[in-house]
Image: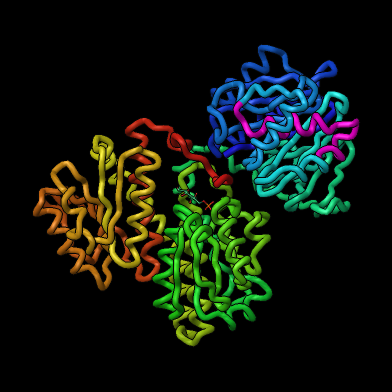
């Protein structure tokens, strides 16, 4: 999704701004641009190609300046053409970049046209630029504070004006914005990662904040216009995140980082204590009678897997809802439910809106399972469990998913223990199993060469079916999602028992059927489902636990999983599916880390 970088310095800042955009590239974008104040006016370069092309342009045109803003745009209003790329100008005096969507832009455009403003883009952003320009009387900070009151919708903006060549003003509402604090220079960005090369000191802005950065200062006012202090935190962890190391793609790097990410996420305690979820958790957990999980995409599959754990281990009724559905439907709120939002970014617009919707309905018990401590979701919920996946750059989620599963398993056991369904001995056993997971994952990662051999075959297919049962049905869904989003092969997942209720009609010799086959209570049923596929000529590709006695034969290809892992098996079984999608995409030559049409951190609805 869109990204913002801004800076005020006493040196040419263009390369810092462009490097910031490079660091945000992973989020997905279709155009980019940079503007600085030079010779008393804003000057810009924009590109509908990659940030590397923008870097060439600024070098060739000698674009230089000490105050500037930059942007990667993921098109919503208006096609990805140069005229719609940010920074957007107003009368060659002001330049502005914007993340989010302005809902009342048509009304504002009509009003501004009435004042003689000409619109040259199809963006909703241009109304903000002209609005601020029309209200400007010499103080950009005050003008932006007044102007944002007219905006309905979500935004993070950064703006510069020719009359204040050492000032950048920013504002946020519904989209993230952080201040980077430097020495004699200051920065703004939509993600601290963008500024990792320039500073490690960050102040995370609150909803409704407006900020002015100058050479030697940062001024913030809150949504009520009152001066506000935001804690400056040192965050040094971003350094290595954008380095690829020996890997071909970030997705591959992140798949292989899973043993480390899981080690970092497993709590360093010998009991599953409520406090792992926050100081108020014991009180909240004592009052709840059910769980309502809200999430999108891959994170919703972590929720679906967790439903099995919560109901079998903690015996607590659990409902999982796609956030974009829940937020708009009429539901019957149960104030004693624990509302759990699961999100890598903590900023996904639909999940955030679903959380606010739940709170609006009277849900007061809220928990975020999230990878970003400073995110909107963590700030809005009463309780939080932080996953420690580290920055995930590849658009397709991998290590975020497996660490979410760890977080949700810890929740299930914690609630199970509190509700008297998990004995102390079982707690110790679960902890031992969790602690052994990284080693088990390493053995699964060692299957990569066998999976590469399968991926050659897969890369020539146009469709694939994924089957799983019980706990592993959401893993089949995740495997299908991974394959379709990065290889563009059409893939569907079904609980294997559903096959004969419709999808079996699709099974021919041309249809590969990927099957997740753990040795659990449903194994024999799954084997019957596999026979149904074979009888129709379908080719089976089975990830089978070593003790399942499923063997390779005509039309059945088997990769043996190294260990049978009981309740935690989904965390192991998803990894070969990630690798299968990854290597199939590589064989098809797609842009694995930035698949077409997709973005990391979906901050628009
Ligand atoms: C798929 C993927 C997405 C995200 C979804 C939610 O690989 O990454 O489906 O899981 O957009 O994002 P978060 O977890 O940031 O809320």
Q: Please tell me whether residue 338 belongs to the stretch shown in magenta.
A: no
Q: Is residue 427 above or below residue 120?
A: below
Q: Is residue 102 above or below residue 127?
A: below
Residue 8 percent location from the top left of the image = 81, 32
Residue 58 percent location from the top left of the image = 67, 18
Residue 366 percent location from the top left of the image = 60, 69
Q: Looking at the image, which is closer to me, 592 or 237?
A: 592
In the picture, the quarter occupied by the N terminus is: top right
Secondary structure mainly formed by the magenta segment: helix
Q: Looking at the image, which is closer to me, 142 or 234?
A: 142
Q: Please tell me whether residue 139 belongs to the stretch shown in magenta.
A: yes
Left or right side of 60 for 488 = left
User: In the image, which residues are magenta?
Assistant: 122-144
The residue lying at 74 percent from left, 19 percent from top is 43
Residue 486 percent location from the top left of the image = 39, 40
Q: Looking at the image, which is closer to me, 435 or 479?
A: 479
Q: Kindly indicate the quadrant of the structure image that contains residue 286.
A: bottom right
Could you tell me how many numbered marks the image carries? 0
Q: Can residue 248 be spotted in the picture?
A: no
The residue lying at 57 percent from left, 33 percent from top is 77
Farthest-out residue, front: 114
The residue lying at 75 percent from left, 43 percent from top is 150
Q: Can residue 447 be spotted in the picture?
A: yes
**Colour scheme shown:** rainbow
């Amino acid at each position: 999704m869109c990204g913002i970088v801004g800076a005020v310095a006493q040196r040419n800042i263009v390369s810092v701004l462009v490097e910031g955009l490079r660091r945000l590239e992973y989020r997905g974008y279709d155009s980019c641009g940079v503007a600085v104040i030079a010779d008393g006016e804003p000057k810009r370069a924009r590109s509908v190609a990659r940030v590397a092309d923008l870097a060439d342009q600024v070098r060739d045109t000698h674009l230089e300046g000490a105050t500037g803003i930059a942007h990667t745009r993921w098109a919503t209003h208006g096609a990805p053409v140069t005229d719609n790329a940010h920074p957007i100008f107003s009368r060659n005096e002001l330049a502005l970049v914007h993340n989010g969507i302005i809902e009342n832009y048509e009304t504002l455009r009509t009003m501004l046209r009435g004042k003689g403003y000409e619109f040259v883009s199809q963006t909703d952003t241009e109304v903000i630029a002209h609005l601020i320009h029309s209200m400007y009387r010499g103080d950009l900070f005050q003008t932006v504070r007044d102007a944002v009151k007219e905006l309905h919708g979500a935004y993070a903006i950064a703006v510069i004006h020719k009359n204040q060549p050492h000032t950048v003003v920013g504002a946020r509402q519904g989209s993230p914005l952080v201040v980077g604090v430097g020495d004699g220079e200051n920065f703004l960005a939509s993600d601290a990662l963008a500024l990792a090369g320039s500073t490690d000191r960050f102040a995370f802005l609150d909803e409704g904040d407006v900020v002015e950065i100058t050479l030697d200062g940062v001024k913030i006012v809150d949504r009520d216009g009152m001066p506000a202090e935001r804690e400056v935190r040192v965050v040094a962890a971003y350094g290595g995140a954008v380095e690829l190391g020996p890997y071909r793609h970030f997705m591959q790097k992140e798949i292989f980082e899973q043993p480390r990410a899981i080690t970092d996420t497993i709590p360093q305690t010998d009991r599953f204590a409520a406090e792992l979820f926050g100081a108020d958790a014991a009180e909240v957990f004592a009052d709840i009678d059910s769980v309502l999980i809200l999430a999108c995409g891959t994170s919703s599959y972590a929720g679906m897997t967790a439903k099995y754990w919560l109901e079998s281990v903690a015996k607590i009724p659990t409902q999982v809802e796609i956030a974009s559905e829940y937020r708009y439907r009429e539901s019957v709120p149960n104030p004693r439910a624990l509302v759990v939002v699961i999100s890598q970014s903590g900023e996904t617009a639909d999940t955030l809106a679903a959380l606010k919707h739940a709170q609006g309905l009277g849900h007061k018990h809220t928990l975020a399972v999230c990878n970003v401590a400073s995110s909107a979701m963590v700030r809005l919920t009463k309780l939080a469990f932080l996953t420690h996946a580290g920055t995930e750059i590849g658009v397709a989620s991998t290590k975020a998913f497996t660490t979410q599963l760890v977080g949700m398993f810890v929740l299930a056991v914690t609630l199970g223990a509190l509700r008297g369904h998990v004995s102390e001995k079982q707690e110790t056993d679960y902890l031992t199993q969790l602690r052994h997971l990284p080693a088990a994952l390493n053995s699964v990662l060692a299957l990569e060469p066998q999976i590469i051999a399968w991926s050659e075959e897969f890369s020539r297919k146009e469709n694939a079916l994924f089957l799983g049962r019980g706990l592993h049905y959401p893993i089949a869904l995740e495997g299908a999602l991974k394959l379709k989003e990065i290889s563009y092969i059409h893939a569907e997942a079904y609980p294997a028992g559903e096959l004969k209720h419709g999808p079996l009609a699709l099974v021919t010799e041309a249809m590969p059927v990927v099957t997740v086959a753990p040795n659990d209570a449903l194994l024999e049923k799954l084997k019957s489902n596999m026979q149904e596929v074979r009888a129709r000529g379908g080719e089976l590709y089975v990830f089978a636990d070593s003790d399942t006695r499923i063997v390779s034969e005509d039309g059945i290809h088997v990769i043996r999983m190294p260990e049978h892992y009981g309740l935690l098996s989904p965390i192991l079984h998803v990894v070969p599916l990630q690798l299968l999608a990854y290597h199939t995409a590589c064989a098809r030559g797609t842009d694995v880390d930035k698949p077409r049409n997709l973005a990391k951190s979906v901050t628009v609805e």
